[in-house]
Amino acid sequence: MALSTIGTNSLADSAVTAAKATGFGKILQMKSVQGTSNVDINSESFADLTSMAITFSPVSASSIILFQISASVNGDHGDVNQGFRYALRDNTGGSNEAEITVFRYVSAQADYIYNHPTVMVRKASWGAGTSKAWKWQGSTTSGSNLIKWNRQSVFSTSGRATFSITEYLE
């Protein structure tokens, strides 16, 4: 039997569906942003993390949505009781979807503490075609101790934070 090849430009958009897509994963879509600004945080109240916002509309009502953020988080100037928390916020509905403590040091004996955590939150789809605005926020875990978010190192003023949202079928 001869092998036939059809170019992708010959396929109608509706010819390939999630139900027919087998053998190569089931990621439906992904959006991401990268931020280079650093943010000084010295409060237990959540503050916006610069550039870490995405508006996202699922394409399937039965999919899973994976939120992921990765950035450097530094304790600075010998503050000995410090930590950092992330909050994933549904900016459309005005509520926190998740709050995660990524590190906490009590009586640490360090002048400079460097972490680069990656945080993931898994959520069921909120409905096909329904757009929501999502953002990450940050706060300290203990009062006014200074946390520097998205600082690459003590020798550089900005890191490379990444926020992505991936929709997939299980």
Image (spheres, rainbow, N blue to C red):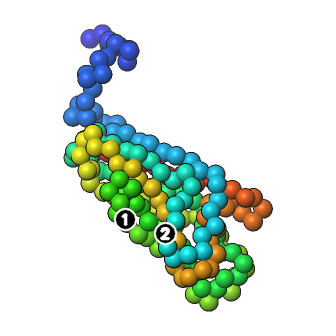
- The quadrant of the rendering that contains the N terminus is top left
Left or right relative to 160: residue 119? left
User: Residue 52: image x %, image y %?
Assistant: 51, 53
Nearest the camera: 126 or 8? Answer: 126
From the image, tell me which residue sits under label 1. 96
Question: Can the viewer see residue 103 in this picture?
Answer: no
The number of callouts visible is 2
Tell me the quarter of the picture where residue 57 sits: top left
Q: Which mark is residue 79?
A: none
From the image, tell me which residue sits under label 2. 46
The answer to whether marks 2 and 1 mark residues whose Cβ atoms lie closer than 8 Å is yes
Q: Is residue 131 above or below residue 44?
A: above
Query: How far apart, in angstroms, are the residues tagged by discs 2 and 1?
Result: 10 Å
Tell me the quarter of the picture where residue 37 sits: bottom right
User: Residue 138: image x %, image y %?
Assistant: 51, 67
Q: Residue at x 25, y 41 (%)?
A: 128
Q: Is residue 61 above or below residue 106?
A: above
Task: Please report whichever mark, 2 or 1, sits nearer to the chain's N-terminal start.
Answer: 2
Q: Residue at x 25, y 23 (%)?
A: 14
Q: Secondary structure at mark 1?
A: strand
Nearest the camera: 51 or 5? Answer: 51
Identify the residue at the far top of this view.
Answer: 2
